[in-house]
Image: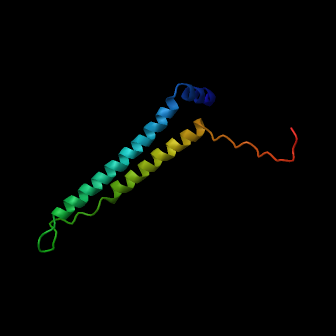
């Protein structure tokens, strides 16, 4: 069953599209997390008072940040694993010694 799936993913270029889609999704998640973090810092900065006190002391949303980091790691690991399964590394040819005669 896996050999048939492997053949289909290779011959129809579905595998390369899937690897690219997983990497693209990881990039989108990184950008989204960066924008959310920047928005939180910007919004948190604007809520500070002139006298130094803040109106709200909302803590940084670490749970969302960690969840996004784990999601990105899973996307990239899945893409890497799929790429290694579909396109294994070609072994280097053996070195030729000058002492051997053809």
Residue, x 60% and y 27% (percent of image)? 7
- The picture places residue 6, in percent across and down from the top left corner, at 59, 30
- The picture places residue 19, in percent across and down from the top left corner, at 49, 37
Q: Nearer the viewer, residue 7 or 74?
A: 7
- The picture places residue 26, in percent across and down from the top left corner, at 41, 45
Residue 39 placement: quadrant: bottom left
Quadrant containing the C terminus in the rendered view:
top right
Q: Residue furthest left?
A: 50
Instruction: Classify 76 as above or below 60.
Output: above
Q: Is residue 48 left or right of residue 34?
A: left
Count of marks placed on residues? 0
Q: Residue furthest bottom?
A: 51
Residue, x 76% and y 44% (percent of image)? 94
Residue 21 placement: quadrant: top left
Q: Is residue 55 left or right of residue 36?
A: left
Residue, x 42% and y 48% (percent of image)? 71
How is the structure coloured here? rainbow
- The picture places residue 52, in percent across and down from the top left corner, at 15, 74
Quadrant containing the N terminus in the rendered view:
top right
Q: Nearer the viewer, residue 101 or 14?
A: 101
Residue, x 44% and y 40% (percent of image)? 22
Instruction: Classify 4 as above or below 18.
Output: above
């Amino acid at each position: 069953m896996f050999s048939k799936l492997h053949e289909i993913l290779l011959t129809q270029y579905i595998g390369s599209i899937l690897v690219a889609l997983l990497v693209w999704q990881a990039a989108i998640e990184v950008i989204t997390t960066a924008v959310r973090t920047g928005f939180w810092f910007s919004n948190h900065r604007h809520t500070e008072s002139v006298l130094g006190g803040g109106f709200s002391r909302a803590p940084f949303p670490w749970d969302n940040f960690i969840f996004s980091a784990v999601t990105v790691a899973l996307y990239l690991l899945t893409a890497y694993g799929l790429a290694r399964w579909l396109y294994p590394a070609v072994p280097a040819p053996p070195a030729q010694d000058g002492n051997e005669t053809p």
